[in-house]
Amino acid sequence: MQETSALLEQLDSVILGNPLATKLSLVCLLAGGHLLIEDIPGVGKTTLSHALANSLGLPFKRMQFTSDLLPTDIIGLTIYDVESKKFHFKRGPIFTSILLADEINRATPKSQSALLQAMEEKQVAVEGRQVDLPKPFFVIATQNPLEQSGTFPLPESQLDRFLMRLSLGYPSAEFEKKLLKRENTTRLSSALVDQHKVMAMIEQVDAIHVSEAIIDYLQSLLEKTRTSGRFVSGLSPRAGLQWLQAAKSLAFIEGRQAVLPDDIKLLASYTAAHRLHCNDGASASDELKLLIEQTQVL
Amino acid sequence: MQWIATIRSWLPPMPSTPPRHSPHRTTLLQLAAIIAVALIMHLQIADLWIGGFAIVVFSVKVIALLRNSGPPNKFLLVLLTIFSLGLVVVLYGGWNGQRAGISFLVLLLTLKFLESEALRDYFVVCLILYFLAASSFLFDSSIFSILIVTAFTLAITAILFQISNPTQQSLGSSIKQSTGIVLRALPLAILIFFLFPRVHGSFGFIPSLDKSNDSGLADALVAGEMAASAFNQELAFRVNFEGGAIPARRDLYWRVKTMFTELNFTWEVGKSFSQTDLNTTAAMQSLASLKQSDDGASYRYTILHERTPDELLPYLDFVAGSDVGKIRYDYSVRHRPTGSRSFTYQGRSTLQPSLTTAETPISRSQNLNTTSQPSARTLAFLDEIRNQANSDSEVVNLVFDYIANSQFEYSLEPPLLDENDPVGDFLFNTKSGYCEHYASAFTLLMRWLGVPARIVVGYQGGEIINAEGANPFLELRYSDAHAWSEVWLNGQWQRVDPTLAVSSERIDIGMRAIQDLWDQGLLGSGYRGNALSDYLNPSGSAKAWLKFRDAWKSAAFQWNKWVVNYDADTQLELLKKLGFNNANHLLTLLLLLVGGTMVLMLLYFIRLMPKAVHYSPEQALYLKFVKRFRKLGIDKEIAETPAEFAQKAVNKAPWHQADIEAITKAYVAIRYGGANTDEQIDRFKKRIQRFRIKAS
């Protein structure tokens, strides 16, 4: 509790005027999921990931995805060492705790799926054996929604791998002025916790209480996405599990012992909307909000 | 149970609670465009005043929409409503009748549109639009009109989709959705239209036809007044002869009514109370029958009549049977008023009167009575005839020959006649006119000469459509209206058509030809020349056009038979064609249909049913707590979480802050925190019971 609020405070001093985005990225990390940020360049995606890594004291790597990126560029490759006359596995950038995969939609589907598979399984296959990735393993992938030429937008099934989708947006006038005056001084923030502490927090998230009432509420929402007829297809059970995990993480960060329906509601557009598509091209987020507005909470 | 899921997936989704967002302005402007179209479609029916008022109200709303201003003053709305109700009453004397009804709907539409604010208001506007669309069928049920109404219905449905959708979507996708939903409904609609059990007779709710748009044959005949109808190209009725054999043109006399009362050169239908006529009517009814087997001398036919206020309806002379009408002493047939729709009936006729003289005596005096006196020059002519003739039949022949041989002319625009002596002026001076001039003059001459005579008004000829095709039928328009005479000779009524003496073309080719030639200025002294033969033997392209016209008219005929006039009898005919000869099969089919429809409806309503909700003890207690805030006007939205509600309640009633926060905390702990021991619930209960709401 103490740690999380201190963490948030530090993050907010770096990322000005967007406490929800910083909180949600922390929620995502502690829930053991991965984050997709869909935004134009220059709104602080890299800064956010840097700050997160620094504050948590976790190793961080950044990869710029390009169309000529190969799966081995991500995972690493086995090379022959002449001196020792042995094959050596040279680890790729994926062996880190926080990975910023910038402009993921620029890479070919082949490279994308190499990353996404690693995200899903938290391990990579090297020479037929499974190599575990560091713990925690958190991917922040970014996507530029405006530039579409020469890109490979993530297919719907791949979007499902991300626990959350965020868009940072422009800062408000007040905070933009502060930014221009460089008042976000702690650019290189110090580590408040370490890797062991982070793993302990992730374990604590699992211990958050989920009442029968929350299960009922979430299940009825999932059911409605399938029967409302507004979406091409409803939410999968995996989506439901991730939604709940995020809610537990949010409750933990806010220092509560139990998940509240407020958590479920707040997270809907971030954890569920990117997995849904409306029949008629309307906004899935708006439709989902409407669906929630029609579902009873007591 | 896969099939149930499949059927359910066809049904449109039902929101568990009605949407409550406010509609987008663009959508409302689209709705305004549709209302504008509806107004244009109906303004010609409604009164000018109503139309003007509706347009003003509509414009005010559109301006308000463009300016984004709020709804008008409530007081003004009440005034407008009272004013428009008054307008309808003053203009139509109530809301009976079609024009009043349409005007009422148009006013309702624009006024509702004006006051609309919330989503459900606009739903009502759409509902009124559907009614207006359907009401178009009262005035026009042609194939074209159904296309227009279908397009209109699609547009309204699309707007409904637009309005009910909280997020703005493109018009194209709404139109796609509405087309989809209409197309999905179409098979069921068609099935129900053709197979749902039809009742005999008409439903009572169809508004009566207004007197102002009467179309039919007048009950009085003054020489020269029928001219207007000669140019009325509106369809009167269509005839389909059984077996396809259509009688010769000279036999195609369609009797509607007879006129035997003459008053100052005006002929009227009159009412007959004479005992002989009553006896004749009785004899006619007992002898005439539709079903009677015959030796091929009679024609059986089905008439599809357009809507008419008339009770006397056309039958081929001489009627020998009718399925619904009541045959009267003068061979006219009375029907019950049919209201505002077109209808079908069947008849059987013979070319000669089927009843013997003894069965149909007449009242001589009734058919000899005149109030008009012949002028001096007419008297001289009458004397001349009387001197030459030895019998009634010779009298008839002499007068007919006089007309045939004295350079009389058939004209659609005859000169006006001298009011004091119309008959003399016509016979010796103008010598120009059409059927009613000849019939009225001839009949009057007969009566002056002592031969019982009367005028028959009806239709003559008609146009044979699809003559060489499989299903020829006859089309008669108001312009085919005709008047001829009947004289009592040898104890029998005999038809004498004096028009035949002047213009055999009118009878042999038909009114249509006469008019076409008249329009081209070819009718007159020289019209027996090339123009007529050209008309009768059209060129290649003209023939193709005629063929196309025939095909189109055939389609229109089938449309009218199978759709517009689809009734219990036609349904039976269709079912027989489908092989349901047996009444039991029929019953099974109907039961299946009705049952199937009900199952579908049931499935639909099961979806609508709210699921039973069981509240846990803490929920029930919390609801009790929430309900108390209603007194302060604080209500919990269904999707509001306890925390959100607490926030709202604290903002609105800060004096309860402590209680609200404590109770909410306790509730959340029990419900979501897993602290739901009996003891805690008990404490919570006491806390709720202690809580009293205060106004401030």
Image (tube, helix red, strand yellow):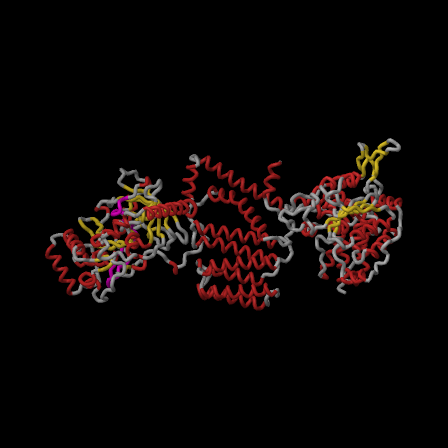
Quadrant housing residue A236: top right
Picture layout, residue B638 above or below residue A200? below
Q: Which residues are magenta?
A: B247-268
Residue B576 in the image, given as x and y percentages of width and height: 42, 37
Instruction: Please state which of residues A102 and B278 is positioned toward the viewer in this rendering.
Output: A102
Instruction: Please give left or right for residue B426 compared with residue B140 in the image.
Output: left
Q: Is residue A120 in view? A: yes
Instruction: Please give left or right for residue B196 compared with residue B529 in the image.
Output: right
Position of the C terminus of chain B by quadrant: bottom right
Residue B74 in the image, given as x and y percentages of width and height: 59, 67
Residue B259 in the image, given as x and y percentages of width and height: 26, 56
Q: Is residue B677 in view? A: no
Instruction: Please state which of residues B190 and B210 is positioned toward the viewer in this rendering.
Output: B190
Instruction: Please give left or right for residue B163 compared with residue A1 in the image.
Output: left
Instruction: Please give left or right for residue B641 compared with residue B254 in the image.
Output: right
Residue B166 in the image, given as x and y percentages of width and height: 64, 54
Picture layout, residue B39 above or below residue B192? below
Position of the N terminus of chain B by quadrant: top right
Instruction: Please state which of residues A124 and B3 is positioned toward the viewer in this rendering.
Output: A124
Q: Check residue A194 for magenta coloring.
A: no
